[in-house]
Amino acid sequence: MAILDLDPGSDEPAREPAPAQAPATTPASEQLEQLRFLYRVIRLATTARTWDELLETVVDGTRDALRATVSSLYLLDRDGENLTLAATNGLDRFQIGRARVPFGRGVTGHVAAAREPLIIPDVGADPRFLWVRGLDQRRFIASMLSVPLIWHDGVVGVLNVQTEQPRDFTASDVDQLRAIADLLAGIVERVRLQREAEGRVAQLRAIDQARVELIALVTHELRTPLAVVRAYADLLAEEPPLKGRRSRDAARRAARAEWHEAATGQIERIDRLVDSIIASVRPAAEDEASAEVVPVDPASLVDEVVAELAPLLRHHRVEVCMDVRRHVLADPPKLRQILEHLMENAVKYAPPDTTITIETTLVEGVVQLAVSDQGPGVPPEWRERIFEPYTRRETHTARGSGIGLYAARRLGEAMGARLWCEPGRPAGARFVVALPATAAL
């Protein structure tokens, strides 16, 4: 059986035991040695190349400074339930990161809970120890001194030193180990927080990369069926040549041609949607490089988009208010996609038989192209969140995918436009695209 507070045993050969009692020294020489060790710890914090090197050097230095046999450092888990062995010397290093002491139990757990140092002159006679398998039976720890690591009034961990020979730890020993623990607590916690932050960043990058790869794969696979659908639509629209004779059903022939044109338009729209999805995961620099800004007539573009989306808008009234013809600097395909996203969003969230309004205003040389609806509106705390990827606000009228508004803002930023949400007038939501005005050419 073994003492959990001492770590499970080692296969390393036992070292010569350290002296049980420190040799006689003067108070001045003890203080000088303590200061030297604290200075070494501070230097270590700025020169250690890795986390493991930092902890190993600290426990080695602590063992030597206290003239002990073994030194061990336990760190409190983030859930506060256990203390996990982070570094040790003289015992089984395999147990680093594995051996755990429940908070409040055993000597180590008791010190963490009480936040006070604890001296154990005779380990074998103390009932607070937790015994587990694995101790190197060639060695038995006789005495122990434990102190808590406190940082910003929170427990970081516990630092232990142990001797093979019985030893009466003095108040000076306690003060020295506490000084080491106080200095070590801040160093360890800051490095630990940094490592955790770096780990989270790495995880987020991996998740983001997986998301980009999945979207790229799905959108790429969509291209082939879209091309096939377009080919079949063209085949279905083929009419035998009249060769100088009149059609027996001219109206039906015209309707089929109109349906083919509408179907082709929707296929192109899906194709543009795929481009939007790809743009949502493409680096911003690539978007900016691909934007071709030219003078654009927004009124003509709005008329085209409203005509293309007529089947989608059939349950809503659409009012276009552009009494003054204004031109803007924009990338036409990107502006078209933005309008499609905003109008689709209005249809999803506004109840049937309500009005969707599209209007332009000129404000200090900037044309504001706005799409307003009479839906439930967007609360102030959501007006920025809705532009984040995969963020959607579910209502009783609709559920979104969380990509449309994000893609719209990315498309706008790529050509130097701004997109935001504000309250509708008198109710609902109003999405505004701000574009530089230019003279008509």
Image (spheres, rainbow, N blue to C red):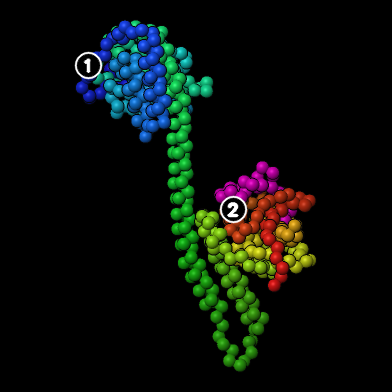
Q: Left or right: 130 with respect to 440?
A: left
Q: State the residue at coordinates (75%, 68%).
A: 325
Residue 285 is one of the magenta-drawn residues: no
Q: Which residue is mark 2?
A: 406
Q: Which residues are magenta?
A: 372-395
Out of 297 and 389, give the one closest to the viewer: 297
Circle 2: element type: helix
Residue at 34 percent of width and 26 percent of height: 57
Type of residue at label 1?
A: Glu
Quadrant position of residue 433: bottom right
**Disc 2 crowd, CA 10 A, few/some/many (<14, 14-19, 20+):** many
Residue 198 can be seen, yes or no: yes
Q: Residue furthest bottom?
A: 244
414 up-or-down from 73: above or below:
below
Q: Residue at x 36, y 16 (%)?
A: 33
The main secondary structure of the magenta stretch is loop
Label for residue 164?
A: none
